[in-house]
Amino acid sequence: MPKTEQRSQPQATRDPWEIVQLARDPQRPYTLDYVNRIFERFVELHGDRRCGDDGAMVVGMGFLEDQPVAVVGQQKGRTASERRERNFGMARPEGYRKALRMMEMAARFERPLVTLIDTPGADCLEDSEGRGISEAIACNQRAMFALPVPIVSVVIGEGGSGGAIGIGVGDRVYMQENTYYSVIMPEACAAILWRDPSQSVRAAEALKLSPGDAMRLGLIDGIIAEPGGGAQADYDGAANLVRTQIVGALEELRPLAPEELKRSRYQKFREMGKPE
Amino acid sequence: MAQGDVTLGSLEDIPADLWEECSACHQLLYSREFEAALWVCSKCGYHKRLTVEQRLATVADEGSVQELFADLPLADPLRFPEYHEKLEQARQKTGMDEAVWTGLVSIGGHRVGMGIMDLAFIGGSMGWVVGEKVTLLIERCVEERRGVVMFCASGGARMQESLVALMQMPKTCAAVGQMNQARLPYITVLTDPTYGGVTASFAFLGDVILAEKGAAMGFAGPRVIQITKMKIAPEVQTAEFQYEHGMIDLLVGREQVRDTLVDLLEWLVPHPVDRQSSGSGVSVG
């Protein structure tokens, strides 16, 4: 499998805890900041056709180099009211089912799918439990393996556990330089394992949540560099680097037949974490 | 049946294995009767968490059990602090190779793949080995055209394997997708407790989903809820809540599990040639 690693500059050595802070920086570009810079003529779609819409998940149709693509991503807010409206980027079952609608449409109309991951985790409060948050996330993963079109996923901020993997089954999965991907927040890990939240820094190290670690573990396909000063300092520059990576990945994937895509996607996740 | 008058003082004089305390209501139960009741408390109805051996005794036809995939290497992909020792201890303590048992069993003559998770092994959590065993089992059953019955019990994805543990979710979901495509029955039984990465992957993808009465379950585990101070009422994280909200097909008492599985398999198993006749009836107690 070709591993494409693109960087515009050598990666500064940041410790994992620092990366977690940067990934959560409210000045970081969010999904719509990228979508508006990367895709042309983006039309956002709403609603899961069952019970509601979810501001924490954005889906829609756009064009990339004149090619139609389906886009799915978690969305955070910046002001207090935006944050509430976006539920802090924690998608509910409606969000995952809206995403599933978009995925199925991508399959039906043979458009590649791009997913942008940025969530502290899926919503798990009573309403979400009652509408089947676990089932929604499980169904999305299963459905993504059946999609006959290329899927490119990029972690653009927080890769928060089940909430992230619910849209994260990509033929190519990339992480931006200052993002993390983990099964649990380091604070919660520290509290559970060592009964001491002040051990969060140690937990962040132990969890191997940085892009470099995910790359070494063979769990992602590449690290996307950020402009000097990080993505939060240069939205256009950051979006350009993400865009270039997505375009490159789609070029690699486009020639593959649907059966070949599905087979290699299965194999890719099948092999992850296998002891040497 | 009331044994409430037995004091702890007098307990010291009798062999410990004669009595067992209900972990929910603390009623002392006569071991032999408790076993005959499939480890359901006669006072409060609590369904005790079972070992693999006990679970097999409640559902499998006698002499039909064949274990598979018990020889995978221990996985510590992150070299997480204190984890390797923890794995070794769990192996010694439980006598299991990992948090899930996998194999073939007959239920009322239907030869199926079976997975049974055990809470005693690091909280029944899912790391690479658990994900791999579940996937291998499903792949084998797709090849041999068998159904799969999965008894779930888990604290969620295993923290010490972080992203590798998380990637067991898509892996097992993909495997279930293979079963669906092959039109083979996949039944899950959610038992006390089932949380997190297991609920959000192979547990909630059953063609039919059963849950044992009173089982705790939910997307976020209780420790995470406690730490993050999220407001989730305890009754939300139950089989009953999930059932009322349409997430589960049947709430079953343990004494109904085997017969229900037989009925479901009769309906679901695709070809009569797949059936194997073997002894029926469970001997328990």
Image: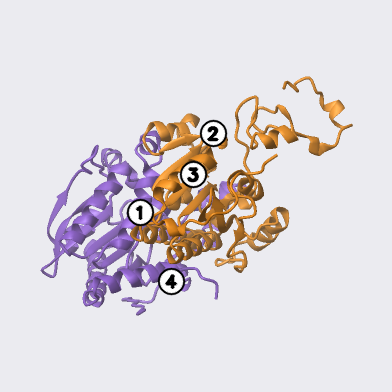
In which chain is the residue bearing label 3?
B
Front residue (pair A157, B94): B94
Q: Are marks 4 and 3 in contact (CB under 8 Å)?
A: no
Q: Are marks 1 and 4 in contact (CB under 8 Å)?
A: no
Residue B232: percent from left, percent from top: 45, 33
- Eye-nearest disc, 4 or 3: 3
Circle 3 sits on which residue?
Answer: B261
Circle 1 sits on which residue?
Answer: A166
Q: What number is the disc on residue B253?
A: 2
Image quarter of the C terminus of chain B: top right
Q: What element carries label 3?
A: helix
Residue farthest bottom in this picture: A2
- Eye-nearest disc, 3 or 1: 3
Q: Is residue B43 left or right of residue A122?
A: right
Going by the numbered disc 2, the residue's amino acid type is: Gly
Of the chain colours in the picture, the one used for chain A is purple
The answer to whether dots 2 and 3 both sit on one chain is yes
